[in-house]
Amino acid sequence: MLRLHGVHAYYGDSHILQGVDLVVGEGEVVALLGRNGMGKTTTISAIVGLVPPRRGSVRFGSEELVGRSPYEIARLGIGLVPQGRRLFPELTVRENLTLAMRSSGDGDGWVLDRIHEMFPILEMRSQVPAGRLSGGEQQMAAIARALLTNPRLVLLDEPSEGLAPIIVEQIGEIVSSLRDRGLSVLLVEQHLPMALAVADRCAIMSKGVIVYEGTAAELAADDDARARHLGV
Amino acid sequence: MDQLLPQLVNGLVLGLLLFLIAAGFSLIFGLMDVINLAHGSFLLFGGYVGLSVIRATGNFWLAAAVVPLVTGAVGLLIEVTVLRRTYTRGHLIQVLLTLGLALIAADLMRWNWGAYVESVDAPAALAGLVDFGGVFQVPLYRLAIIGFGLVMAGALWVVLERTRLGAVVRAGVLDREMVAALGIDIDKVVAGVFALGTALAGLSGLLAAPVTSLYPGLDFDFLILALVVVVVGGMGSLKGAFWGALLVGMADVLGKAYFPEFSLFAIFLIMAIVLLVRPQGLFGTREAT
């Protein structure tokens, strides 16, 4: 479904991604792990075109994404839940959710009612400015906002960041439920237990390249790899 | 007293004209981070185009329909061909570009319409004075400007606050990149807002003409007032443009009436106080950079 091959990307003169190869299969949850500053978020930005790769290829289904603008990439069916949520704080929760809403082709996609069923709190807060939500609620709103564009692939960038353990568990359940509905997910995460609980496969990044790939069970059993690449 | 009331009405008239100019100016700044120093040129250009239409046809209303179409189209053309290339290149190049455009436009307009003060008559239907209980009289045309300005403010508010397109524009002011990442062609929205802003500026040039007349320099006079309005009201905020415009309009008119030797001083005093107390402007959300 998503296939990165030899992706190089820069921030200014800094060579951040140095040949990333990564695959997310249909209906698969892949966790992208690694210490801070290793290029995980840049990988996400490179996929959605916010940091256009200078070399390499990003294929989504049969489409090449490199060279396309962010809005075209999103319209191909990629939903972004960015680091720090990036809700529009002064807009109401409802406006945040419906702003970019797109119906799915088959008429069986995400609509506002279904989102409200899944996240009742967002219905209760629909007229509140998104900036006044709690961290957990903001994370749910950011996920809901992406789902309402009816993507086939969801990119989640550190959804557990800054959240209480009980909320992190909830977010993990949400990610699992997305997989159950047939969505593909690329999950960037610092919170290893959560990542291991929800992911099918794990990839670890270090200094702009993928240095480890395996199933979640393999990584959970591989003390050496965890110690070497993640320091845990 | 008999002096103050008419001055207050004049302050409202100038304030609402300023609102029509500053609304576009402020949204353009908020959305694109571009200080469009050519915004006043669109105003004067609109006034002159209106003058030509009125001279050719004698019809003010036809001019009022043609002017926003012409200035909006020119604005769209400039956004798509030139301005769009500068969004990622920082303020300096944008300021140089739009200032250059403003200077070129000023010369072209002087060349085509001359350097004399051109007066424009209010339409016949709005000629005459309205008497307020024998206390003072106000030209009907000025009251019409007040009414139109309030209607436009209401219409803009509804579109911006109550429609999905309006939500996209407000979201774009906050985080344009994120809007694009959600699958919205924000470039088109930006171009549309620029066209709308320049159309409004042109129309307000025509509406102002019977009050201020048209002359070389009117473009920069209004540009400076619009800048002050946006600084006072807050960048990218419609509410800020509205209250900022009324405040600046009032201050300018009252300052000129009562302290003519300090007329500009009144405006800049307000601006200085706002900048000291609330650097982001009365209704702004972020500080000027």
Image (cartoon, rainbow, N blue to C red):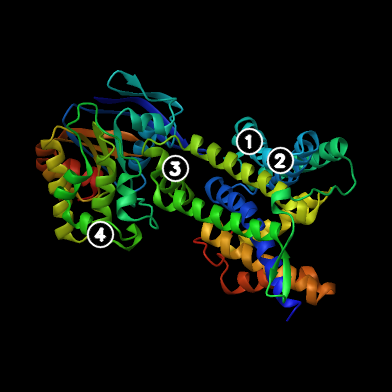
Crowding around mark 1 (Cα neighbors within 10 Å: few <14, some 14 to 19, many 20+) is some
- Is B95 above or below relative to B276? above
Q: Are the residues under badges 2 and 1 in a single subunit?
A: yes
What is the C-alpha distance between the residues marked 4 and 1?
41 Å
Which dot, 2 or 4, sits closer to the camera?
4
Q: Please report, as a chain letter, where disc 3 is located.
A: B
Q: Along the polypeptide, which appears first: circle 3 or circle 1?
A: 1
Q: Which mark is residue A125?
A: 4
Residue labelled with disc 2: B97
Which dot, 2 or 1, sits closer to the camera?
1
Q: Is residue B237 visible?
A: no
| Tags 2 and 1 touching, CB below 8 Å | no
Name which residue lies at 83% across and 49% down.
Answer: B119
Please identify the quadrant where the C terminus of chain B is shown: bottom right
- Is A146 above or below relative to B275? above
What is the C-alpha distance between the residues marked 4 and 3?
25 Å
Q: Please report, as a chain letter, where disc 4 is located.
A: A
Where disc 4 sits, the SS reads loop
Q: Please report, as a chain letter, where disc 2 is located.
A: B
Which quadrant would residue B231 be assigned to in this image? bottom right
Amino acid found under the numbered disc labelled 1? Leu
Q: Position of residue A172 (x, y in %)?
A: 15, 48
Q: Position of residue B93 (x, y in %)?
A: 68, 42
Amino acid found under the numbered disc labelled 4? Arg
Please identify the quadrant where the N terminus of chain B is shown: bottom right
What is the C-alpha distance between the residues marked 2 and 4?
45 Å
Q: Which mark is residue B177?
A: 3
Q: Which mark is residue B69?
A: 1
Where disc 3 sits, the SS reads helix
Amino acid found under the numbered disc labelled 2? Leu
